[in-house]
Image (cartoon, rainbow, N blue to C red):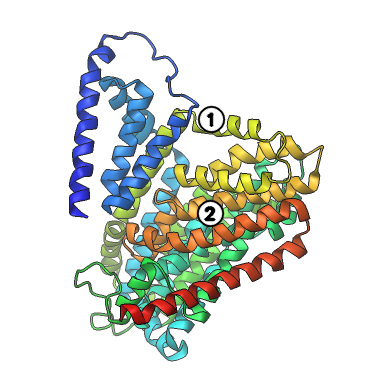
Amino acid sequence: MKGLARKAGRYAGWIFLLAACFSVTAFAAEGEAPQPAMYATAASLIPPVVAIVLALITKEVYSSLFIGILVGGLFYSGFGFEGTVTHIFEGGFLAVLSDSYNVGILIFLVILGGMVSLMNSAGGSAAFGRWAKEKIKGRVGAQLATIVLGVLIFIDDYFNCLTVGSVMRPVTDRHNVSRSKLAYLIDATAAPVCIIAPISSWAAAVSGFVEGEDGFSIFIRAIPYNYYALFTILMMICLVVMNVDYGPMAVHEKNALKGDLFTSGKSEEKNEEEEANPKGKVLDLVLPIAVLIVCCVIGMIYTGGFFAGENFVAAFSNSDASVGLALGSFFAIALTILYYCIRKVLGFRECMSCIPAGFKAMVPAILILSFAWTLKAMTDSLGAAEFVAGAMEQAAGGLMSLLPAIIFLVGCFLAFATGTSWGTFGILIPIVVAVFEKSDPQLMIISISACMAGAVCGDHCSPISDTTIMASAGAQCDHVNHVSTQLPYAITVAAVSFVTYLLAGFVQNAWVMLPVGALLMVGTLFAIKNITAGRKPDNA
């Protein structure tokens, strides 16, 4: 693996050298640069593919993302040195880090990091771990509790990832559940749950993309056809109850049973009980989390106009998740500090010292998010959206009944390559509406659901997805470990969903296809369990 990393470094050096060679023409050019020659072509998807492949091969995410950004900059500038550097910074890093939505998410991340640090210092996390050890019996109970909490916190995927991670990490650690498994459970109850929850930021986003139709009504009708989201939840429960693990996750879980939660080869501490604040109580974790949930909900409906007269559902649909979460988390951390000071579990100075400590813990997630956003900006500037939209419109002709399955695959690939499910909705849903709204309304519902399912699947698999990055941060798991261990699970659900969409395009009945797909999902897991069980004696 180290040899592969060295090769990747040499390839990066050649790319830089190639850029320098082409710089002569760039400096000679004057005036505004024309539209990139690779605009709206298949080449527009190469930068994210390069980044993803390098990350999976080298296990090093920062340099892989930067090389992907560099390739995007080179393509945009026509391999000119000056144009490449200018586009990477002005059109990339500076643009995404000055975007108000992105800044709001970063503020939310930093405050959440501070809250986690506060709860740890107050002894709340350790106290909750001790309580959960008595109440939650065994690894199955710990994992099921994580799933239930993830399903209950359906407001927003970012909020879900960090909150569930903060609450359940002490519990899963005590029952020797690997951090990779925890990250998978968090990730699989984030976007897949939000995309089938009518009151969520995701429902609002999808409804907004369905122009000329009742978007909220269509979202509700599409839920039974959202096979990837529904089957992901079913698969999580089956994996835990049936005690099935396969692929890299099986290795991580085996190591966790021996005490190595990280499968990193390093002696990392997992037990904070010895250094925990003796004054800490379970309430010191539960109350701040409850306050955080309430404050964030209030913050989101505030941005949607609830206090200006809108009803709750409409306010949630119109909410700005970035501003709402930033406002809510700010008031939550202020109230948490006040509570700890009143209870005298922490002094004011101790509380203040926890904030930079929490910021430091979130630096890896912030760096990866910044790189991922910049890579998406490079992809957007190369016209990836226009390329996919054009390809979909050309393919829509005589493939009506097969189109849900095709849209699912396209959504998977596009979200995987770009790291954004919302962007995938924006590209594909208007095309689906235009194709089906007058000819076949029922197939339009199935195809919109296939688009949402594919987007969530690609987002779930992609190492440059912000939700995947948040899940790694919430579980405090190595990001590449999280991606590589959850990929076989996500692909399994995607394969079952694809087959179900193939049949649904002809059957067009949710209450027939949903049980068929669910049986196929359970049957697939039973087959995998038998195959892996058959291999164990040979490996012993």
Choose between 237 and 316: the one closer to the eye.
237
Position of residue 38 measured from the top left corner of the image (x, y, whole percent): 43, 24
Q: Is residue 343 visible?
A: no
Position of residue 294 measured from the top left corner of the image (x, y, whole percent): 55, 65
Choose between 323 and 54: the one closer to the eye.
54
Quarter of the image where the C terminus is located: bottom left
Q: Give the crowd class for mark 2: few <14, some 14-19, many >=20 residues within 10 Å.
A: many
Q: Give the crowd class for mark 1: few <14, some 14-19, many >=20 residues within 10 Å.
A: some
Q: What residue type is labelled 1?
A: Phe
Is 492 on the left-hand or right-hand side of 76? right
Is 213 on the left-hand or right-hand side of 346? right
Q: In this view, does 533 lie above or below 515?
A: below
Alpha carbon of mark 2 to alpha carbon of mark 1: how far? 20 Å
The residue shown at (39%, 55%) is 469
Position of residue 268 measured from the top left corner of the image (x, y, whole percent): 22, 72
- Report the residue marked by disc 1: 387
Q: In this view, does 238 lie above or below 49?
A: below
Q: What element carries label 1?
A: helix
- Report the residue marked by disc 2: 457
The residue shown at (37%, 48%) is 369
Q: In this view, does 367 lie above or below 29?
A: below
Q: What element carries label 2?
A: helix
